[in-house]
């Protein structure tokens, strides 16, 4: 239900302004949360066709390819991005692909590499947090979530998360911040769900 509400909301935004790339990306993300892997890549590609660089959209398209088990296509796409983004962004995408290929040692080596260089990169903490969440490394995810909050980057992570967060106690404590709770409440209300804070 929540996924459908989000798709409906983002579809409306796209109708209002079809030339605004983020509207395509947000609709793709909504379909991804609903696990609609037919439509999610379609709108990520339409965002890309507007020729406005968007690292999140490219990351989303890589995730779509992974979910569709089109790993070679994902790898080829990342190769094509080598001159578009910095090494941090490319390593993050390669970590996703390594996870999908069950190349755990390679994925962790990318994560370790990402973790030693982000202090000067604005917006890097939420990316690292999300990768650790994806990999199920919750202690590390909590550490980077706290850094994201300290650096005032945490909201960039929250708007990309599904409604149902992991139930780990440490994560709940890390997410229990006034700004996060307010955002969760607004998001739940917009999606027609309960006003209870997760």
Image (cartoon, helix red, strand yellow):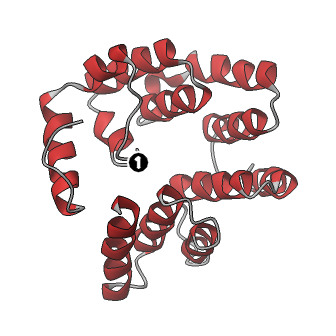
- Residue 81 picture quarter: bottom right
Between 1 and 17, the one lying in front of the other is: 1
- Residue assigned mark 1: 160
Between 179 and 188, the one lying in front of the other is: 188
Picture residue at 33% right of the left edge, 18% below the top: 146
Give left or right: position of 97 versus 38: right
Please state the horizontal and vertical placement of residue 127, each as a whole percent of the image.
50, 35
Give left or right: position of 23 versus 34: left
Residue 159 drawn above or below residue 105? below
Give left or right: position of 124 versus 51: left
Between 147 and 38, the one lying in front of the other is: 38
Picture residue at 49% right of the left edge, 60% below the top: 34
Picture residue at 43% right of the left edge, 84% below the top: 19
Please state the horizontal and vertical placement of residue 73, each as a whole percent of the image.
83, 58
Residue 27 drawn above or below residue 2? below
Circle 1 crowding by C-alpha within 10 Å: few under 14, some 14–19, many from 20: some
The kind of secondary structure element at disc 1 is loop
Please state the horizontal and vertical placement of residue 60, each as a whole percent of the image.
58, 55
Picture residue at 34% right of the left edge, 60% below the top: 2
- Residue 191 picture quarter: bottom left
Q: Quick one: quadrant of the C terminus?
A: top left
């Amino acid at each position: 239900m929540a996924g459908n509400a989000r798709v409906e909301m983002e579809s409306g935004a796209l109708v209002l302004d079809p030339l605004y790339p983020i509207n395509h990306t947000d609709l793709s993300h909504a379909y991804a949360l609903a696990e609609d892997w037919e439509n999610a890549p379609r709108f990520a590609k339409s965002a890309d066709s507007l020729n406005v660089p968007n690292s999140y959209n490219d990351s989303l398209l890589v995730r779509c390819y992974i979910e569709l088990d089109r790993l070679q296509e994902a790898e080829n796409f990342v190769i094509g991005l080598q001159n578009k983004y910095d090494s941090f962004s490319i390593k993050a995408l390669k970590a996703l692909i390594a996870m999908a290929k069950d190349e755990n040692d390679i994925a962790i080596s990318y994560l370790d590499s990402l973790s030693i260089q982000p202090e000067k990169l604005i917006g890097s903490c939420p990316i690292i947090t999300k990768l650790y969440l994806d990999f199920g490394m919750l202690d590390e995810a909590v550490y980077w979530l706290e850094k994201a909050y300290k650096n005032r980057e945490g909201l960039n992570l929250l708007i990309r998360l599904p409604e149902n967060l992991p139930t780990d106690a440490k994560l709940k404590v890390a997410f229990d911040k006034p700004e996060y709770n307010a955002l969760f409440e607004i998001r739940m209300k917009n999606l027609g769900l309960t006003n209870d804070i997760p």
